[in-house]
């Protein structure tokens, strides 16, 4: 499934680049986009359009096809640079992003219910400084679709210790799925 914000068809990439160019002509200064960046986008768009027209005509050769790929790779690289450096931070609003054919960031958090099961693990030591966890739900329940386990780790005193009453923050920790 294609999840990239940049369209796959070259004609659509070119149309998006031209749209950006038109919008940036009016808003580059207020969005802090240097005129040199806009000039490069315009130049790369013109080059890509010229070579795409050749590639879609009877003049097409393997050399023209390679040139077309290189031109669109350069255009995509410039567009990715512009998005990551100038479009992801204010002063752009959701309507600005939509005008650029980009999706605004979804700020609505999906509610996640509290856990109803608890996991336990068998711990194996397959090598030096390695631990292997075989995770399962206590009581033999099955893992719900989309569910998982979260592993918290740290250095404990000899003999282990109880987990703190308040679970550590889940930011930055990824769930580990059981097999």
Image (cartoon, rainbow, N blue to C red):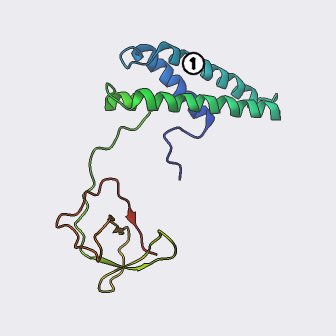
Q: Nearer the viewer, residue 151 or 10?
A: 151
Query: x and y percent of residue 126 in the render?
Result: 51, 76
Q: On the rendered structure, is 50 left or right of 126?
A: right
Q: Residue at x 53, y 53 (%)?
A: 1
Residue 32 x %, y % = 39, 18
96 over 139 or under it: above or below: above
Left or right of 33 on screen, residue 113:
left
Q: Residue furthest left?
A: 165
Left-right relation of 104 to 23: left
Residue name at image x 44 percent, y 20 percent: 23
Q: Nearer the viewer, residue 89 or 55?
A: 89
Q: Splitting the image into 4 quarters, where does residue 99 fall?
A: top left
Using the rendered view, name the quadrant where residue 89 is placed.
top left
Q: Eyeballing the image, is 68 above or below 129?
A: above
- Front residue of 51/169: it is 169
The tally of labels here is 1
Give the side of residue 60 with respect to residue 175, left or right: right
Instruction: Name the secondary structure under disc 1.
Output: helix
Q: Nearer the viewer, residue 12 or 47?
A: 47
> Against 34, is 48 above or below?
below
| Residue at x-position 48% and y-position 24% | 20
The residue under the point 30% across, 53% down is 171
Give coordinates of residue 168: x percent, y percent. 24, 60
Callout 1 environment at 10 Å: few (<14), some (14 to 19), or many (20+)?
few
Q: Which residue is mark 1?
A: 40
């Amino acid at each position: 499934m294609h999840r990239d914000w940049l369209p796959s068809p070259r004609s659509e990439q070119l149309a998006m680049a031209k749209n950006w160019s038109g919008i940036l002509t009016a808003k580059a200064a207020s969005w802090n986009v240097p005129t040199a960046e806009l000039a490069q986008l315009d130049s790369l768009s013109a080059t890509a359009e010229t070579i795409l027209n050749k590639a879609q005509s009877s003049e097409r050769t393997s050399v023209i096809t390679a040139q077309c790929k290189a031109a669109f790779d350069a255009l995509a690289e410039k567009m990715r640079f512009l998005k990551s450096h100038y479009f992801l931070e204010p002063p752009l609003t959701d309507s600005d992003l939509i005008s650029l054919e980009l999706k605004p960031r979804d700020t609505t958090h999906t509610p996640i219910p509290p856990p109803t099961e608890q996991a336990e693990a068998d711990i194996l030591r397959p090598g030096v400084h390695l631990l292997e966890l075989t995770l399962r739900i206590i009581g033999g329940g099955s893992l719900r679709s989309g569910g998982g386990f979260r592993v918290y780790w740290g250095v404990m005193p000899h003999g282990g210790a109880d987990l703190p009453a308040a679970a550590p923050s889940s930011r930055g920790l990824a769930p580990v799925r059981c097999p």
